Amino acid sequence: MPKKEGYSAEQIQVLEGLEPVRKRPGMYIGSTDTRGLHHCVYEIVDNSIDEAMAGHCDTIIVTLHDDGSVSVEDNGRGIPIDIHPKKKLPALEIVLTTLHAGGKFGGDESGYKVSGGLHGVGSSVVNALSTKLRAEVYRDGKIHHQEYKIGKTQYPLKTEGKTEKNGTKIQFWPDGEIFDTLEFSMTTLMTRFRQQAYLTRGITIAVLDERKERPTDDKVHPRLYRFSFEGGIAAYVRHLNESKETIGKPIWFEKDTDDGMVEVGLQYSQSFQENVISFANNIHTMEGGHHLTGFKAALTRTINAYARSQGLLKEKDDNLTADDVREGLTAVVSVRLKEPQFEGQTKGKLGNAEMKTAVETVVNEKLAEYLEEHPNEAKEIVGKCHLAARARLAARAARDSVIRKGALEGMTLPGKLADCSSRDPAECELYIVEGDSAGGSAKQARKRDFQAILPLRGKILNVEQARLDKMLANNEIKSLIIALGVGIGEIKDVEKLRYHRIVIMTDADVDGAHIRTLLLTLFFRYFPELIDAGFLYIAQPPLYKIAKGKDVRYAYTDEQKEEVLKEWGVATDVEEEEEEGEEEEGEKEKKKSPRVSLQRYKGLGEMNPEQLWETTMDPEVRTMLRVTMDDAEAADATFTTLMGSEVAPRRKFIQTHAKSVKNLDV
Ligand code: 0RA
């Protein structure tokens, strides 16, 4: 940890004015969209977190004011206000009105600011991009304040009033001429502050939303939120594993080394996902770096050594691979060091090579210790890794067999596939349909020149707890992959894709939702390029058919159904028929008009081919949802819940989402 005692006005590097910041804001805060706007808050909060990490502050309060401003108050020592001998200005004013060399997102590596580094470097950038900024410093029983407009000082530092407090409060009004939007998101801020509170044990970060008009997303949150985690990183790991069936309690250790602090939390679960996240000086290193490399190396080495020493891995067995030992692992690796180097495209990669050895040494030692002291958990962990290794071999075998079949190309197109006649992928569509009876309807309904139908048996449902590699061995899935024509694994060739529209068409019930999820998972894991290219769709069959004489309407949502019934003057609380049939309306006024019938489709099989065509398959009128990769991270969490071995959260998820396919966006 850098020493901060005795730091005063003379030590602050004075470099240049703030003009460049307004000229090229993106260089300093990344962008001027909503991300850049939120970045300003992080810049200010990071300085308070530095003060907390130095041990001088334990509470940070962030307030979203109704006038569009944000304030950040901490109970630290207060930004120094003594006068700089050469510049003859208070340190506070220098910190807020002068720019440190280089931009955070610019080319100058040396200018990269880190939490835990020099105080206040980013505040001047925020000041330059604000129509107004007010700083208050509580020190020595007095209140000191100063205001700025687009970074320009409005009056000399003023000392007035008494206070018992110590600390700093910065309030700023972001400039609408710079930012595309001035709307802060409580949801976004909370995610960031939760993460930072986990990483800094003992700190409390509170967010207070005082806005009268709140964005829709934010209305779900209480107006005051406090993040404070005594458990630190261990609590973070517990939080990440909340819906999973875990092995033992989170493992946690920290050690101060010559090269910096190393802190690690980890826990295995029965899921197949890996979730390892790393930080350097509280900054999320998205692209990893040497600290993460050290962690992975130590994990592989230590678990193999333990497994061998206990005879859990026989002499003839190969070592577990790095991938094997990370399956089902959730871990947080956090390091703090004096001079962090951030590299890579988004500066999200730690470049300090010494951190590999530092983390590796600590993890080797502490993890070995843990395994020795917790033989039951250790055994379960090794068993889990072993399973991953076996699955890896099985998956390879399954893939090979798929590839072998695929290699025969057109010859082996599955018998169940009703292919289209066109050979131009750009105009060809493949409907993946649940069940043979719906498949039959779809085959009759389709336009055979460009629409192909592949019925999948409900059988794939049985793989509900199975792994994807088992799915690949499944005949239904093999048929699908062969029909797509692209192969899989190393032999994948997306150019060979036979259809540029792949449409998942399943029933609007729980089983349908389940099959759809399995298929989405398959595409997400094995054919992400097809999702990226926008080739994957979800069909939208109607939920209801409502008829009055010759007038037939289809409703795709409950709201639409209500609308039609209202239009036709039918009481909306009318009971739906269980089975298809006519419904007699009791009310007198309706006697003269034809009877209204309401049919609820439980499955695609209930629709006759014409209905299926005119509601779901006719390109002229149908709507389909295009599956996107937009939120791959969120999707992965969805899949974890759905594919995980714990049944309860999965069932809950399917029940709540069975009808709202939109929430399943991949
Ligand atoms: C440098 C020295 C001292 C405090 C700080 C910086 C400081 C900066 C910020 C930014 C936000 N909150 C802050 N709190 C403290 C201490 C100087 C001293 O008392 O010797």
Image (cartoon, helix red, strand yellow):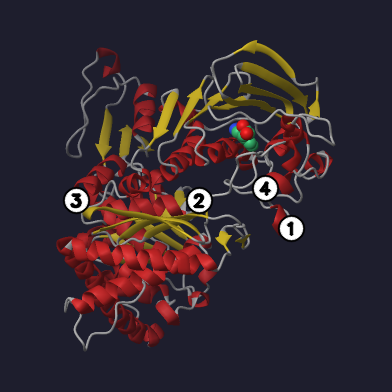
Query: Badge 4 is on which residue?
Result: 30
Report ligand 1 position as a quadrant.
top right
Q: Residue furthest top?
A: 161
Q: For this view, does 379 lie left or right of residue 69?
A: left
Q: Which mark is residue 107?
A: 1
Query: Badge 2 is on which residue?
Result: 620
Judge by depth and name the residue closer to the eye, 27 or 111.
111
Q: Amino acid at mark 3?
A: Val
Query: Badge 3 is on which residue?
Result: 647
x, y percent for residue 255: 40, 56
The 10 Å Cα crowd at callout 2, few under 14, some 14 to 19, many 20 or more, is few
In terms of secondary structure, where does tag 2 sit?
loop
Mark 4–mark 1 Cα distance, whole angstroms, equals 12 Å
Mark earlier in primary sequence (1, 3) = 1
Mark 2–mark 4 Cα distance, whole angstroms, equals 43 Å
Quadrant of res 476: bottom left
x, y percent for residue 38: 60, 37
In terms of secondary structure, where does tag 3 sit?
helix
Mark 1–mark 3 Cα distance, whole angstroms, equals 50 Å
